[in-house]
Image: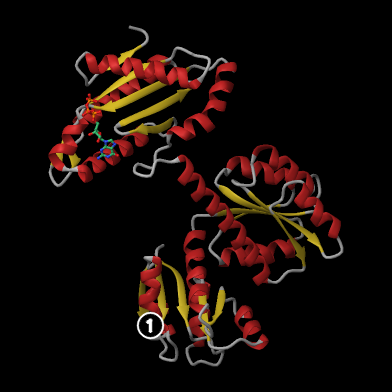
Amino acid sequence: MNRILLIEDGQMITHALSSSISKELAIEIDSVDSLAEAKARLAVNHDYFAVLTGQSDPDAPDNEALDEIMQLHIPVVVITASFSEKTRNELLERGLTNYIVYDSKHSFSDLIHILQRLYLNQFVSVLVVEDVFTDMQFITKQLRKWLLNVHEAKNGIEALNILERHPEIKMVLANYHMPEMNGMELVKALREKHDKENLAIIGISALDEKLLSASFIKYGANDVLTKPFSPEELLCRINHNLEMLELQTDLRDVIYRDHLTQLFNRRYLFEKVEKQFRSAKSAGQSITMGVMDIDHFKRINDSYGHHSGDAVLQAVSALFSQRFPDCITFRLGGEEFGLILFDTPFEIALSRIEQFRHDLKGTAIDLGHPVYITASFGVTDELTEQLEEMLQAADRLLYLAKQQGRDQICTNCE
Ligand SMILES: Nc1nc2c(ncn2[C@@H]2O[C@H](COP(=O)(O)OP(=O)(O)OP(=O)(O)O)[C@@H](O)[C@H]2O)c(=O)[nH]1
């Protein structure tokens, strides 16, 4: 879902907001005049992930329509001109996802933040580990209102099983008191496999258990929540921790991915794959290293310009990672790429690379007109002490393939 529905009730600044929001978030916004009209639109169009309105008056004539909209489980964010405890309680009791008090220059960035979070949450899975039924209900209801995909476990053992089956889970909220395996034991078990940058853990303890909060942090939780907590507090912590994870991912991408093609870079190879290389070797697994270089790439730049050359590099990379999703694919620089296949018999690795060479040659790359390219390959499965030596061996074979006429594969078995 990728659109926002704005209910324009004439009492607020929503109209001006609409264009600013769509500019800021690159998300489409449609507007309607009333809640009743919104209800009708939502019934036929399922592209909306959020409804934004200024209409929150419990005595409004089409108040029922707002309740019916909320039954569709689409988050409703209300913009209100002022904050009071009464307004806040009324809004939350009615089940609205959030409210924005639009009274300062920060209000717009708060609103953008909320809408952006809702959009991203559609793709985020979290796990709640809690054995108290009412607490589980309270937490999961809040999280679902925020469009998070929620999994539930009643104890640590169940939680570990769910995580095994759902590696896409990004965050775990774990209560301390649980049968079979308590929250602390769960944190310890999770940190054996998942580091803080990839899986956020929020420990939950009670107000009189200050020491537990400290222990949660010591054993590797990213954060702690103390019961009882308000919906706002819960969501603030969750958002904060998800944002930290996303920042870490962005940072890793900047460091370890090639900017043009989004493939891994040389640095990733030597900092991250070296370890995997050593453990695969000691486990007796086969390892295939391949390098590929586009033939006469300079001619593409010379004939169509550097920009078109970049487009060719991107098209080749897209096909490369699409054909080898289970392997490590990387760009070594310029028009040279590489891949590593772990635990794959050499004949199979070779026939996959040969199929790729053949398909690449037959693929029309669209530069406004079709352009065809070929590539040469060096492939080896001869294990070396270091990963770098294996890469150098593949590179020598690639050089041979170029010398022998290009558009071919040279291997260490010839
Ligand atoms: N568009 C574009 N060109 C690049 C990039 N990196 C390197 N190049 C160009 O790639 C070309 C490589 O040329 P050469 O090393 O002579 O190799 P080639 O023309 O592919 O010939 P062979 O490898 O011998 O088949 C040079 O013109 C570089 O400027 C890049 O990121 N984008």
Mark 1 CB within 8 Å of ligand 1? no
Q: Residues within 10 Å of mark 1 (few under 14, many from 20)?
A: few
Which amino acid type corresponds to the residue marked 1 in the rendered image? Ala
Image quarter for residue 47?
Answer: bottom left
* Coordinates of residue 134 in the picture (x, y in percent): 74, 65
- Side (left or right) of 242 relative to 5: right
Residue at position x 15%, y 42% from top?
304
Q: In this view of the protein, which residue sits in the foreground, 130 or 61?
A: 130
- Side (left or right) of 103 relative to 374: right
Confirm whether residue 12 shows in the render. yes
Task: Say what secondary structure mark 1 lies in.
Answer: helix
Count all numbered tags in the image, as a single digit: 1
Q: Quadrant of ligand 1?
A: top left
* Coordinates of residue 193 in the picture (x, y in percent): 65, 37
Tag 1 residue? 16
Confirm whether residue 73 shows in the render. no
Residue at position x 64%, y 80% from top?
93
Quadrant housing the C terminus: top left
- Residue 116 vs 95, above or below: the answer is above
- Residue 40 vs 190, above or below: the answer is below
- Residue 397 vs 248, above or below: the answer is above
Image quarter for residue 31?
Answer: bottom left
Residue at position x 56%, y 58% from top?
243
- Side (left or right) of 311 relative to 23: left
* Coordinates of residue 174 in the picture (x, y in percent): 72, 53
Quadrant housing the N terminus: bottom left
Q: In this view of the protein, which residue sits in the foreground, 324 or 90?
A: 324
The coloring applied to the image is secondary structure
Residue positioned most to the top: 414
- Residue 37 vs 378, above or below: the answer is below
